[in-house]
Amino acid sequence: MIEKIITNEHRLIEGFYLVFQPIFKVYPSGSSQVADYEILLRAADHRFPKDRFRDIIKNEEQNGIFLDWFAERVTQLMGRFPQKRFDINIEPQQLFYQNTWDFLTYLSSYSTQLTIEITERTPSYFDYPSKNAIILGGSLSKIKGLGYKVALDDIGSGQNSLGEVVKNHQNIHRLKFSMVCFKNVKNQIELNFLKSWIKLSKAYQLEIVVEGIETKEMSASLVDDQCYCLQQGFYWQLPEGIDSLN
C-alpha cells in the first residue's frame, strides 16, 4: 500500500522541473538591470504542463503533493541565492486549500525574497458562492500579512479586472500587463490602453510589469513613449535553468 502511494505521488510530478525568467527595470536612458525572477514550471516536453497542473490542483490532496515538491526546491533556491528576489505563481483555485496556506506559512521566513503572483484564472472547483470576495479580498490581505509582496497577473483578464484591482489595491504591490494580445506596440490605441494602467499604478503607488516584450523595438518604444516600467519577455531572456542565475 505504501509503495503504491509513493508511486502515485511520483507519477503526479514526474518530469517536472523549474526554469526562471528575469524581469528587468528599464531606465529612461535605455539601460536596464534585473529586478527579480519569475519561477516557472516545466515538464519533460519543456512546456508548462497546463492540463496536468489543472488536474493536480482540482483537489487538495494532489495540490499538497505538488506543493511539498515545490517547497523543497524553493527552499534550496533561497539558500543558494539569498540576495535575489523570486516570484511564485499561485492559482486562485489553490487558495481554497489549507495546504496552500501551510505552504505559504512555511516559506514566510523567506518572504523578503518572494513575491506571490496570483494568476487571473477563475477557480473551477469551489464550495463558496462568493469566490471572488473570498480570494481577492481576504486572501490578498492574508498573504500580505505573512510578509510577502503580492502581484496580480494579466490584469484586465479573468478575475483580475480593473474593479478588483481598485478594490484591493491596498494589498497589492505589483500589476502585470500582458502585451501578447497587443503585437503592434506602435499602435497608439494599444499604447494608450497600457498608459491607462500605468497611470492607475502610479495613482496607487504600484509597480507594473509589461510582459510579452519580444523585440528590441517593442522595448524601446515603451521608453520613447515614457512608459517607464518593468519589462519581461523573450527579447530580454527566455526562461532558463538554475545555472542562468549565477
Image: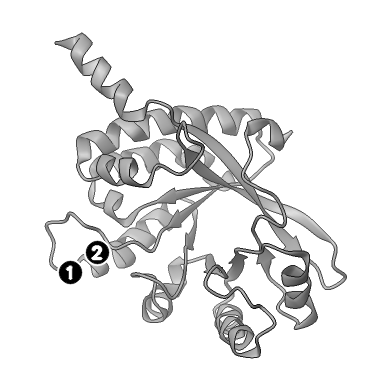
Q: Which mark is residue 70?
A: none
Q: Are marks 1 and 2 in contact (CB under 8 Å)?
A: yes
**Residue 75, position in %: x, y?**
51, 30
**Residue 17, position in %: x, y?**
49, 31
Rendered image coloring scheme: one colour
- Give the number of callouts: 2
Q: Identify the secondary structure beneath mark 2.
A: helix
Q: Which mark is residue 130?
A: 1
Camera-nearest residue between 21 and 60: 21
Amino acid type for the residue under numbered disc 2: Ile
Q: Which mark is residue 134?
A: 2
**Residue that appears at 48% across and 51% down:** 147
**Residue that appears at 60% across and 73% down:** 183
**Residue 210, position in %: x, y?**
61, 68
Relative to 82, does residue 195 appear above or below in the rendering?
below
Amino acid type for the residue under numbered disc 1: Ser
Relative to 216, does residue 11 appear above or below in the rendering?
above
Residue 66 falls left or right of residue 116 = left
Q: CA distance from mark 1 to mark 2?
A: 6 Å
Name the quarter where the N terminus is drawn: top left
Q: Quadrant of residue 128?
A: bottom left
Name the quarter where the C terminus is drawn: top right
Residue 233 falls left or right of residue 57 = right
Q: Identify the secondary structure beneath mark 1.
A: loop
**Residue 28, position in %: x, y?**
83, 73
**Residue that appears at 62% across and 84% down:** 195
Relative to 67, does residue 144 appear above or below in the rendering?
below
Residue 108 falls left or right of residue 22 = left
Relative to 163, does residue 147 appear above or below in the rendering?
above
Camera-nearest residue between 46 and 36: 46
Residue 9 falls left or right of residue 184 = left
Q: Residues within 10 Å of mark 1 (few under 14, many from 20)?
A: few
